[in-house]
Image (cartoon, helix red, strand yellow):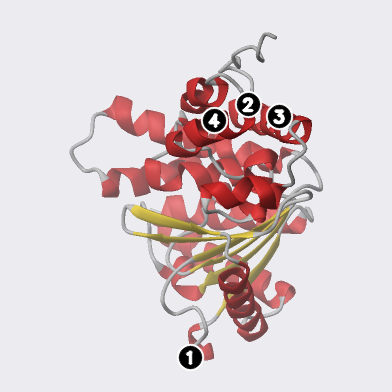
Amino acid sequence: MPGPKDLDPSSSPRALLGAELRHAREKSGLTQDELGQPLFVSGSFIGQLEAGTRRMMPEYAVKIDEILGTGGFFERNCKASTKSKYPDHFAEAAEAEAIATAIKEYAPLLIPGLLQTEAYARAIFRAYQPTATEEVIDGLVAARLERAHLLDDPTTPLLWVVLDEAVLRRKVGGAAVMKEAMRHVVTLARHYRIIVQVLPFQAGAHAAMDGGLKLMSFSDAPPLAYLEGLGSGQLLDDPASVARYELAYDLVRASALSPEASMALIESVAEDYAHEDQP
């Protein structure tokens, strides 16, 4: 009996691969837990593979083919599902972000990528790679701006961001760039597309002082937490770890200014940058 056709890499390969995995698993009469046992992963991890929130690594693909008798289908096609325009440490998080129903983020230093303007993103990437060609920087900026199309939908995902006051005060790209960046954030919030709060300096010590934090929820898969460092990132699905970071985010949010007070502060800072930008 012929096996499934190879996937078309141009059409959401991770989601398609996940759908094929669910079909093959159910056809074999296995639960997610039963398939996960010989792979030494949890049933929830199998669920995330099926939902497309986690990428299938080659070593898993080979074993899945053996267990489900799929004739090398997953081994052949997992390569297509791992191709990404994003850096390796962020690729899996970016692709999970694209199908999340809710995203909650604490940003300690920079405006989150989904909220960045072109000029702000360009200034960041140039700082990261001072000797890169313009073509390289253009590609990075384009990929970041493409991510922002996630907000074209008027309601999904819910995006709730807590910005540290340092994000407002760090002058990325100069006064003109910051003025535009601040006003862009305010516009999104005033049009009820996002919820934004500012964690002021006066809040003192808080639960997320170790770094940035992103939490993602999904309609048909367990939640994920993403922690990012310098050129590195960690996507976590362990329920206890995710619960710990959800508590940290809730504590930060509780210490932040209200959304209206936050908007007033951001608008005030934007005006300061506007005055500074005058000749």
Residue at left offset 35%, top offset 54%? 232
Query: Relative to 171, does residue 69 appear above or below in the rendering?
Result: above
**Residue 35 visible at all:** yes
Q: Position of residue 64 (x, y in %)?
A: 56, 34
CA separation, marks 1 and 3?
Answer: 52 Å
Task: List the residue tagged with mark 3.
Answer: 24
Residue at left offset 54%, top offset 30%? 66
CA separation, marks 1 and 2?
Answer: 44 Å
Q: Amino acid at mark 3?
A: Ala
CA separation, marks 4 and 1?
Answer: 54 Å
Query: Relative to 142, does residue 128 appear above or below in the rendering?
Result: below
Q: Position of residue 7 (x, y in %)?
A: 60, 17
Judge by depth and name the residue closer to the eye, 171 or 83. 83
Q: Nearer the viewer, mark 4 or mark 3?
A: 4
Task: List the residue tagged with mark 4.
Answer: 66
Q: Are marks 1 and 3 in contact (CB under 8 Å)?
A: no
Quadrant of residue 42 in the image?
A: bottom right
